[in-house]
Amino acid sequence: MLLPRSSQVSRFPPRVLITGAAGAIGSCLREGLRPLVDELVLTDVRPVAPGAKERFVQADLADRDVLLSLAQETDAVVHLGAVPTEVPFDQLVGPNLVGGFNLFEAARLAGVSRVVFASSNHATGFYPFERRLVGDEPPRPDSLYGVSKVYGEALGRLYVDKFDLQVVCVRIGSFAERPRQLRELATWLSYGDAVRLFAACLSAPNVGFRVVYGASANTRAIWDLTPARELGYEPQDDAERYAGEVGGELPEFQGGGFTAHDMGGWA
């Protein structure tokens, strides 16, 4: 068995690979994590203009050889690359299923210590909105997209148990500059808190396998942030400051519109 280069991460990994670096979360994390690393290695199917302490390699998640080459040059991975919403199944297979496997396999073969996997709250979107979740409840995905994130979490669990990787799965909430609807007063993840959360996931020692919810310190929270706080996450923002600016009604289920029968073209 090829063991990770380090069995314990107690400091910030000097070289971090970010897949999906051209996306909204990737762009945010690049800015926030850059001061903490020696180098950020970025990859995406879309071009990215690298900045200081950054290197970009344009690649598709279907190309396992390229991912292996990139993983061999880094100490930890933030895996954001995926189709980020509900679409027909055939469009999810490559990026979310094959790409997820390729990433974890590349990390294993390269001896990478840690993978922080961008999961989603849509892995549990069919829980009633008022049900408070910690992260150890059975999955209840609200969409094929949510199913793909459950699959990614299961891959992470396998690679921890079989190959001794360290994996943190972050069930990201509503990542945005500010809440846009009533539901997001509970599920919002601010830009600053996203950086704080992923930094904690990358640097906490001995994580083994963890599933944490990615949200700010919202007064109306429906997810328990204790597991994330145990990694050193200290959220500083609260969606309540925007309560007077959003309207609408609370959904029946936590996944909101993703639970609709016709979401993703099913009808």
Image (spheres, rainbow, N blue to C red):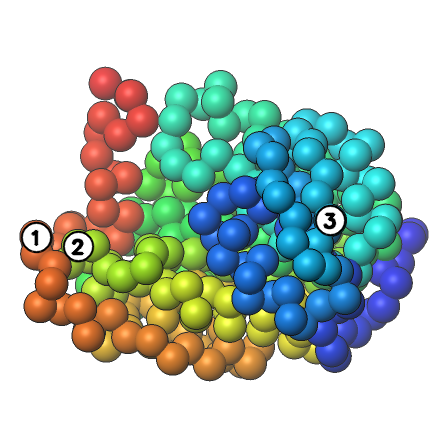
Circle on res. 248: 1
Q: Tell me if residue 240 comes above or below residue 144 in the rendering.
A: below
Identified by mark 3, the residue type is Arg
> Residue 16 at what x, y percent from top left?
72, 58
| In-image side of 194 versus 176 (left or right) | right
What residue is shown at x 33% (from left), y 41% (from top)?
Answer: 142
Q: Which residue is mark 2?
A: 181
Which of the two marks, 1 or 3, is nearer to us in this view?
A: 3
Q: Which residue is mark 3?
A: 55
Q: Mark 1 and mark 2 in contact (Cβ < 8 Å)? A: yes
**Any part of residue 207 in sight:** no
Identified by mark 2, the residue type is Gln
* Residue at far right of view: 1
What residue is shown at x 17% (from left), y 54% (from top)?
Answer: 181
First in sequence, mark 1 or 3: give its number: 3
> Residue 211 at what x, y percent from top left?
52, 62
Q: Tell me if residue 5 comes above or below residue 255 in the rendering.
A: below
